[in-house]
Amino acid sequence: MTETGEAALADDDYGRCRLAFLRGRIGWDGGQVAAAEAAWAEAAELARRAGAQRELFELVGWRALAAALGPTPVDDAIRQCEEWRELVRTSPLATASTLNPLAALQAMKGDAERADALLAEAGAILAELGGLTAGYAHLAAWARLLTDRPDRAEAALRADLETAIDGAALATTTALLAQAVLAQGRPDEAAELSRAAARHAAAEDTLTQVLWRGVAAKVEEDEELAREAVALVEGTDLLWHHGAAMLDLAHVLRTRGRSDEADRAESAGHELFQRKGCVPRRS
């Protein structure tokens, strides 16, 4: 970039906003959620200064997602999402982008009733706007999985598969569907779905890479896959998913009769859930 171009960009809040957003996406794909949130906070301030309301509202959705899945403790994340919900109350779509993260956070606390109410509110908004998009369907399904209703997660994900065309979204949808199917006692189908997710998942999409490995590891009692999932996620600040990967490893170790190692892995997983401030799940 020439000196003239750099000077122009320095004076261009909108252009700098878009660059900060992209930095956040790179951090997000790598599982560096705190770094992504910092970039998106910067982008939001630049959008505000540029008068770019559409970009500001879009960023609220990404920041709410980061609050739900990243290192922010659940109660703090709920407060943040409630504040953002108020900020974007004039936009139905942006409002919906805060409701599903809020539902996931309530599900992490074990409050299925509150999670249901938020999902219903988001669903009503999105129905008026023409239906779910992948990002909304993913969080809605995840909240259902957290509250032990995998059949409802499956229904939403299968509807999403019918319209998914983006490879990354398709991979995540398929990996989550594999989880929902496995939770209903259909391991062969879950294995097939997890391998389909593996074929579609981008190498840099850390979250999806962890998800499909977790399902395949449990179905196939594959310790190597379980440890690969842990290795991928342990360098991130995706606390809940790191904890879940440890429990998946514990499950595989128990099937191999290595109870002491399984206990240690399960304990490590519960410590991660505690750091996030959510109800532990079973291995």
Image: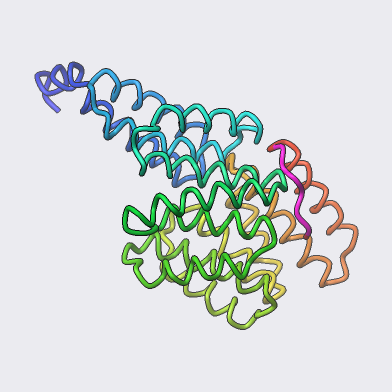
Q: Residue at x 53, y 31 (%)?
A: 82
Q: Relative to 33, does residue 17 appear above or below in the rendering?
A: above
Please state which of residues 213 and 71 is positioned toward the viewer in this rendering: 71
- The residue at the far bottom in this view is 188
Please say whether residue 242 is one of the residues in the magenta stretch: no
Q: Quadrant of residue 281?
A: bottom right
For the point 18% across and 22% down, which residue is it? 9
**In-front residue for pair 278/147:** 147
Image check: 242 left or right of 177? right
Residue stretch rendered in magenta on the structure: 277-282
**Residue 95 occupies quadrant:** top left
Q: The N terminus appears in which quarter of the rendering? A: top left
Drawn side of residue 103 relative to residue 55, left or right:
right
Q: Position of residue 8 (x, y in %)?
A: 13, 19
Q: Residue at x 51, y 47 (%)?
A: 100
Residue toward you, 159 or 121: 121
